[in-house]
Amino acid sequence: MAGLPPGRWRGRGLAGLGLSEGAEVSERHMALVFGQGRHPNADRIEQRLLDDGADSAAARRATVLGQPIEEIEARNQTPLLALDFTFRPQVSLTVLWAPGDAHTRRVIERAHERAVAQALRWLEDDVAETRWASGRGRARTPALVVAAFRHFDNRDGFPLLHEHCLILNRVQHRGGDGEPRWGALGTTRLYQNVVAAGTLYSLAMTTEVCEELGLATVPREVTPGLRPVMEIAGVDAELIAWSSTRRQRIEDALEGLTYTWVQEHGRLPGEKARHGLGWQAAQDTRPEKKTPRPLEQLLAWWRASAVLKFGRQVVDGLLDRCRTVGAALRARVDPVVDTAFAAVDVAAVVFTVRRNFARRHVLAEARRHLLETLRGRAFAPGLDDDIANRALADHARQTTVPQPGRRVPAADQIFYTADFTEPDPWFIAGTGGRPPRESSRYERARVASLAVRNAIRTARTATPQPRRHRPPRTPSNTPAGTSPSHRRSGRPPSTPTNRLRCPTYTWEAGRQTRRRGCAHRRTWPGSPPTPARPTPAAAPSRTDRPRPPTRAVRSTSAARSTNSSTGSPARTKARASSRDSPPGGTGGEANGPDAGTRPVAQCRDHRGPAGYG
């Protein structure tokens, strides 16, 4: 098409067609391959066969790739000859590319081309497969035939760098006789992995551009409640709006569609309904394509438009401003990714959004997480796969059960679920004249992952509390075990490493839980040796055990009633002092003959010198 660069052939499957990587796609190639399902050099092959004496039908059939289109249409089916995978960078990268200098444009275009190639290689290696016999036969085929076409503008003529990759729905595989045969692709698997391929492209391109130009990314909320888009830091929202000309028209149309939906249903649309209304608004406001213009003319017009709206100083200093902001952000970003936290976030988001998910969903979210966490910094190859594998291993459980006698499902066809606690939905007040909305599944997923992250962080940082130095306590004539504050002060520390456990009770986070059947007692570190317990036959009965003097009990009750009636803070202060004290009483409390030592911690049924009451 005039004004656009010619298409280029890509993919490992070009060898079976006699084509080379990067060769130009002619109009005749497009008509034969994607219009008739025939060899790109069908005219030459057919003419050679006719010269050798073959009839016209046999000569034509020899140029067909796979099943002829005529046979498919004879069964009242629509033939599918290609799939269009479109790759495009974030708007901020397009804004840097359009009015930028030649070096900036070369860096962005080279990163775009490499990212597209990496996404196509991933589709070939991990996704592509061929099928025959109505899907009963399947085989991996890491060789696709792709025709790539690069476009530079949107339907309004503003900058939008993107690439259309037409993937031919034909691929070679080895037949029963060992000879190569053309068959159809497993298009369902390609459709299922389109999001994972797109996230791989965005991650690869953004990382290369940021590393090459010294930039960083920041999250930008495009649709309230949905995942933010990682844009280049330093590109203002006004510049993004200048390039995204259709955004305002879509929002205006969406407001009218939402109002009509509320009038019909009597309630606000949910998340799924909002997605449908957004798609309808985009289709209703989609203009017709215009005649493409050469890139040199577009670059001059884009620069003039940007300078007229924002000024020459803003346009010329855009890259320097982005580098300054990016350097500050990159200095604060830790280049090491904590895979444990990353796996929690990825699993929580995928589970809350989808409930049942496959590995492709986890892998796509892992790539989004790397782009959001590293802010454009480089990472080790294969880190996205490591995070996805850990999320499935640590936080997911398989729900797909292989059936005996049936084909074992592929790895990306196995589904999982998780056991995260999802918070209840809440409503969020609207801003800018928008109506209130219910919290999205993505927002609830972030809250669910935060709880698990905090638990992991607490487990990592939990260490034994150092023992406080206390002055020696003054002996007293008060018998040990008769003071209620003495018993209260015997609480063990509530840190996980210093829990006091017993078959009858346990202390955890400052709370006592009773359990039956105690047969032993535990002591605190530094306590005196525990006297030998009597044998069960010689142990006194519960009614024969010594009890505290009656006078002490009455004085305790009186002290409580006096404090409660007068509102004195004495009891409150005693409690605070006892919590800060080691077992056995406060620093100034009398402890009888055991003063200055840590008494034995015992169960409720084993009252003694330091019995818990």
Image: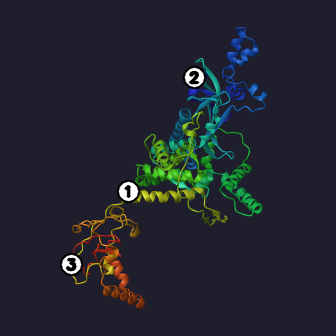
437 shown above or below 239 = below
Examine the rendering and report whether any part of residue 109 can be seen.
yes
Mark nearer the N terminus (2 vs 3):
2
Q: Residue at x 70, y 12 (%)?
A: 49
Numbered-mark total? 3
Residue closest to the eye, 321 or 332? 332
Tag of residue 281: none
Residue identifier under label 1: 460
Q: Inspect the image, locate mark 2, and give the three-letter code of the amino acid beneath it.
A: Ala
Counting from the top left corner in percent of width and height, residue 308 is at: 61, 53
Q: Secondary structure at mark 3?
A: helix
Q: Callout 2: 10 Å neighbours few (<14), some, many (20+)?
A: few
Residue 586 horizontal/vertical position (percent): 28, 78
Q: Position of residue 229 (x, y in %)?
A: 56, 52
Q: Residues within 10 Å of mark 1 (few under 14, many from 20)?
A: few
**Which residue, given by chain and number where applicable, does mark 2 sit on?**
15
403 sits left or right of 538 in the view: right
Q: Amino acid at mark 3?
A: Pro
Mark 1 vs mark 2, CA separation in Å: 54 Å
Read off the residue under disc 3: 593
* Amino acid type for the residue under numbered disc 1: Arg
Residue 333 coordinates in the image, percent (x, y): 42, 53
Circle 2: element type: helix
Name the residue rendered at 59%, 43% in the picture.
195
